[in-house]
Amino acid sequence: METKNQLPFILSDNLACALSDKDSAHIDKIADKIKAEDPKLATTDYFGSNVRQGYRPGPVLFYEDHRSIALSSANSFGHYQYRFLLLARQDDILLVEHKRALKYENYCRNILKLPSPEIICLDGEYNNSPLAKRCSENTEKLKQIAKIAKQSGCINIMPYISTGWTWVLAQRIAEIARVPVYVMAPPPRLTQKTNDKLWFSERLVECIGHRALPKTYYAFGPASLAIKVSRLAKTHSQIVIKIPSSASSMGNILISSSKISNMTLAERVDYLSNLIQFYASSEIFPLAVSAWDSDVITSPSLQVWIPRLHQGPPIVEGLFEQALDPKTHAFIGAKPALLQSKLEIRLIYEASMICHLFQKLGYYGRCSIDAVVAKSGNRNNIHWIDCNARWGGVSIPMTAANRLTGCWQNNLRIIVQSKINEHNSSIRDLIDATEDLRYNSYSKKEGIVIMNPPKYENTTYNDYMVFADTKRSENEILHNVKKVLGT
């Protein structure tokens, strides 16, 4: 198993148990079939012999870029590019763009007492060009990174999500520095597949069976979509259309059965075609059409690290669920899940099955697997709904909490994500306003850790996690943060 000495960050204990011999053989058979059908699924040979998958002790180049995720815009996630600063070490590099967030850098250095890595900023306005592409075409920045790689004898790249440009950047650094470059992520084609909702659904059925999904059909065109939606609308009050490659719920289009019940088939075709074109302008068929679970009791998300095949089994580090405001009960983020033991064991085992398959296909790195648990009589049905084959808004703070405290399970209570338009005059900067509520590594062990620069363009982002000893302390901190921010 990978240990903290084999990675640039600390992994939590593995919650998963080994697969049974029967299930292990079943997963092997599925993996062999997929690899035979798509032998280049995990190929990276064309990036050169000095570009390799994995991690070697040495500096890490971190960068977060959401452009390859469907339904995200070039600048909508600019403020997130600093989240990896919570994981970076002294000799590492954080690649950002547009402009540096000096105030947040000072907060991480002076309050959290984190080391100061090299910050390399690609100047200029945000555009649709991937950050890794822009860096790979910037001679000055490439030489700067290659110099660090050459001095260290290697360099590692840790992307938020692996793309072809991630590997091209690795290739160009390797060509200049003439040292090995390691990519801490899956090959680009495998990343694309594991983030595809339809591909993921098919793998779930192969691994676990049809019970792993709600009632689901595939639609290969507008007429087919209208027919499949109509079929589900007869027995279910809500239906969800899933866009194959998108960021979790952003690609889920929820439809009320009553909305379409009196439409003719032609009217349904027009209505649904216009609806999906609003979400995505490009050709997006085939689509998955599923029944929307009712009587949902929880929506767990399992945070997983998948080592390379020879390094041990997938590591399930934590189970999280949606967090609600203690007073308004509005959705505000994520929190560690408190589930019945039997349900937790089932979730971990089934997620382990799909992650073992990913690993055997050549996957390496972070991912999260999302489910819903719905009550059906005396039984809890587990339906798996999404795979986010990348880092995310739970895994980054979870790993950062482990780094700051040594054990996130004993300290991390809630991860809060919110944004407020700048025109709200009551907004105060999160860093300044919460001085007395902030966690620090030397004296205040309860409080908030700010996860990214609070101010970005015309929006304020109040993204933070709460460290607390008790539920009462957590609620008190949440109340005080809202009070000082005037929200």
Image: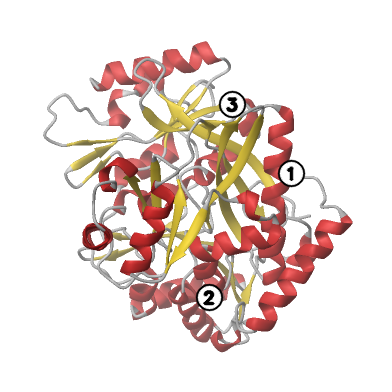
The residue that appears at 48% across and 45% down in the rendered structure is 86
Rendered image quadrant of residue 359? bottom right
Name the residue: 50% across, 30% down.
Answer: 295
Residue in the foreground of this view, choosing between 220 and 370: 220
Q: Residue 87's x, y, as percent?
A: 52, 48
Using the image as rendered, state which of residue 221 and residue 128 is in the foreground. Answer: 221
Q: Which residue is mark 2?
A: 189
Give the residue at the far right of this rendering: 21
Identified at 26% across, 57% down, the residue is: 268
Circle 1 crowding by C-alpha within 10 Å: few under 14, some 14–19, many from 20: some
Does the image show residue 454?
A: yes
Mark 3 neighbour density, 10 Å: few (under 14) some (14–19) many (20 or more): many
Residue, disc 3: 411
Alpha-carbon span between mark 2 and mark 3: 37 Å
Q: Is residue 180 visible?
A: no
Quarter of the figure with the N terminus: bottom right
* Residues at marks 1 and 2, CA–CA distance in whole angstroms: 27 Å
